[in-house]
Amino acid sequence: MSDRSYIQVVTTSTTRGPLDLIAIERAVNDSRPEGMTMAELREAARILIAHGATVSGVAKRLRLSKDRIREWFPAELRPGGTRKGATQCGTPQGYRRHLAKGESCQACRTAATQATYARRRGHTLGTAA
Ligand SMILES: [Zn+2]
């Protein structure tokens, strides 16, 4: 047995909606077949990340750029590399960092929106009492 366990993707059916699960299973375990759609590649990347793969590992396996992987899964990816001053995703601070770089990140946007609402609610309650 190899130390890397096989990831089973195909279960009862070989497709899910537009996704070819056989192609995805091959991509996550072996090498990316030709002709995979972006949706299939994205699903393969999601599965690999769920199994603890790194950004560079996923990018290499699926022959995609690391930026593409990060763009697809900003929230799921652990902040690797511990860059100095790196801000975590899913926080208002992260949102501001994205804004400064002109990036879009759903996790951070949600966090920032919630923080704004929480602040507004706080103010309203404070003045209405
Ligand atoms: Zn983010």
Image (tube, helix red, strand yellow):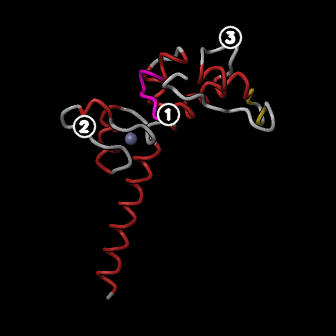
Which residue type carries mark 3? Answer: Glu
Mark with earlier residue (3, 1): 3
Q: In the rendering, which numbered label is found on residue 91?
A: none
Residue stretch rendered in magenta on the structure: 52-57
Residue 14's image quarter? top right
Tell me where residue 126 appears, x and y as whole percent: 29, 81
User: How many other residues sit within 10 Å of disc 1, few (<14), some (14-19) or many (≥20)?
Assistant: some
User: How many other residues sit within 10 Å of disc 2, few (<14), some (14-19) or many (≥20)?
Assistant: few
Which residue type carries mark 1? Answer: Ile
Asked if the stretch drawn in magenta spans residue 54, the answer is yes
Residue 1's image quarter? top right
> What residue sits right under mark 2 in the picture?
86
> What residue sits right under mark 3 in the picture?
34
Q: Secondary structure at mark 2?
A: loop
Q: Secondary structure at mark 1?
A: helix
The outermost residue toward the top is 34
Tell me which residue sits at (66%, 32%) in the image. Answer: 8
Of labels 3 and 2, the one closer to you: 3
Q: In the rendering, which numbered label is found on residue 49?
A: 1
